[in-house]
Image: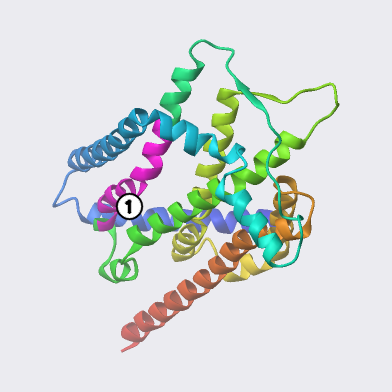
Amino acid sequence: MQGTNVFTKIKHKVYLAMTKLQSKFMSNQSEMSFIEHLEELRWHIARSLAAIGIFAVLAFLAKGFVFDILLFGPKEAWFPTYVGFCNLSHYFGFGESLCFNPKHFDIIVVDPMAQFLSHIKVSIVIGLILGFPYIFYEMWKFIAPALYENEKKYTKGIVFISSLLFLIGVAFGYYVLCPFSLNFFSSYTVSAEVTNTWRLTSYVSLIATLTLAAGVMFELPMAVYFLSKVGIATPESMRQYRKHAFVAILLLSAVITPPDVISQLLVGFPVYLLYEMSIFISARVQKKELALEKAEEAKLNR
């Protein structure tokens, strides 16, 4: 029953948020018609796709650097993560405990089109990553006119902050999650009779998925900010599920890192820090929303 009540409250808050957003767009109907809004959205999407296309073409032309350095770098011993962790291990007197790198494995293709299609996929992913700041800028330009003036004031710098969080997440995924994951999967075996040989498409998918997923994951503070603005996320609920989040983060870290506590903490700490940051952001938003409500009530009571 309690879960049903929570779900009902969330549905009600989403309905109120959508109604509020719809009323803002309807208030602008005298300036722009529905068709004109769609036309404007079409051009925002077209410019965003053009940005992705430009960066994707540049990545496609830089095939040697993209594949030999960027894509296949995390499987080589010279990759900065392996060198950096080993240096830290020696510096702090941990010996060789943090010195690791994936076991050697061959990458093969079993489909004649696999190399070409992988080349295109990697280029598009790079185009999406490099073009994300501009894509978010275009989408924000479409959404911003529907906001009230006080809401615009609280969202200054949102394009920069969102882009920065996404790029930090991408870097975290590439330099931390990818090496640890490759180390785990290349070392894991069900039998000595099985030799690890990876398909190119599988390798590309793993690197792309971890990198993009980390970028999206680091947008958690921004997502919580907007969810808190419409009343869906609250600091109380996030504090209530803090233990669950902590356990989930530790389990994820344990799966993708070598079997030692230090490595698990090095991976899990930034993710948990994001969660705590999100609680702080939610509390700040809730405080401001309550202050605005009290100010509006005071005006009505005059």
Left or right side of 83 for 17: left
Left or right side of 99 for 77: left
Q: Is residue 241 visible?
A: no
Residue 207 image point, x, y percent: 55, 37
**Position of the C terminus by quadrant:** bottom left
Left or right side of 236 for 143: left
In which quarter of the view is residue 298 placed? bottom left
The image shows residue 9, relative to residue 78, as above or below, that is below
Depth order, front residue of 282/115: 115
65 within the magenta span? no
Depth order, front residue of 220/105: 105
Residue located 25% across and 69% down the image: 149
Q: Residue furthest top?
A: 112
In which quarter of the view is residue 33 placed? top left
Residue 245 image point, x, y percent: 68, 59
Residue 49 image point, x, y percent: 30, 35
Sort mark 1 into few (<14), some (14-19) or many (20+) by Cα contacts within 10 Å: few
The image shows residue 12, relative to residue 75, as above or below, that is below
The residue indicated by pointer 1 is: 22
Left or right side of 98 for 11: left
Q: Is residue 264 visible?
A: yes
**Position of the N terminus by quadrant:** bottom right
Question: Mainly helix, strand or loop, the magenta region?
Answer: helix
Q: Secondary structure at mark 1?
A: helix
Residue located 56% across and 24% down the image: 201
Region in magenta: 123-144
**Mark 1: amino acid:** Gln
Residue located 46% across and 64% down the image: 225
128 within the magenta span? yes
Residue 88 image point, x, y percent: 65, 62
Depth order, front residue of 207/91: 91
